[in-house]
Image (cartoon, rainbow, N blue to C red):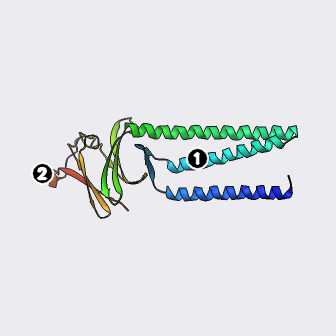
Amino acid sequence: MSEEKKSTAGWGTVVAVVTVITLMGVIFFWLKGCELYIGGVIFRDVRALAGMTFEIIMFIWIILASALSFKKIKDEKERKKMRGSIIAVSIVMLAMLGFMAWIVAGDVERSGKAAIAETDIGEGQSLLLAENEEKFSTSGESFYEITVYCRKGIRLKKIGRQDEYYFAHNNMVKNGQYRVERKGDTVTVYYDYGELINGLKWKEEYSDDPPEYIDKNYSLK
């Protein structure tokens, strides 16, 4: 290969790497502090998935470039060395693909088991409530928890949580036991309390006339 062609190939590699790194930075900034909602599935580890996707793209580029160079190498030792490198990179790439598939499958399964409800709150936004069954790591006892998101397009911003452990009939999202109101940059969710359990009681000022709803305010900023 002539010096001119080597120089051109070198600059091409530099441009490709800089382009990928820049694009990766832009996407990571866009994904900062958010999750994605696509096809009814909440993807939680989106930055990790994006990072692995870019790494896999780089691995594919390395494998293709190495395969093209492999054809031009005549020395058997060099061919053997490059063959080993291609195999090693391919194994790492396949392992990463498997890990990505595992993460995506986990998000699909979790979303499939969740009760997800969405309410339009104007200005191109909606409030998404995702109710999942959780378990205490120590006792294994299960309870329900609501994660509150502000949705804009496919982006989800987590703005709060509501623990349903202390209520006799939880599943507030599944049963539609809530209502939503927006005022400026604040949204209020009124949760139908049901009854308290585990010996818990309302405060003295509420004992004679307990509230119909528990209200929680969430900032959209």
Residue at the outermost bottom position: 184
Under mark 2, the amino acid is Asp
Q: Disc 2, disc 1: CB below 8 Å? A: no
The x, y position of residue 177, in whole percent, is: 23, 45
Above or below for 174 versus 208: above
Under mark 1, the amino acid is Thr
Above or below for 185 versus 45: below
Q: What residue do we see at 58% from left, 55% from top?
A: 24
Q: What residue do we see at 61% from left, 59% from top?
A: 22
Where is mark 2, residue-wise?
209
Of badges 2 and 1, nearer the viewer stands: 1
- Label placed on residue 53: 1
Quadrant (top left, top right, bottom left, bottom right) of the C terminus: bottom left
Residue 137 in sight from this viewpoint: no
Q: What residue do we see at 29% from left, 58% from top?
A: 187
The x, y position of residue 134, in whole percent, is: 37, 39
- Label placed on residue 206: none
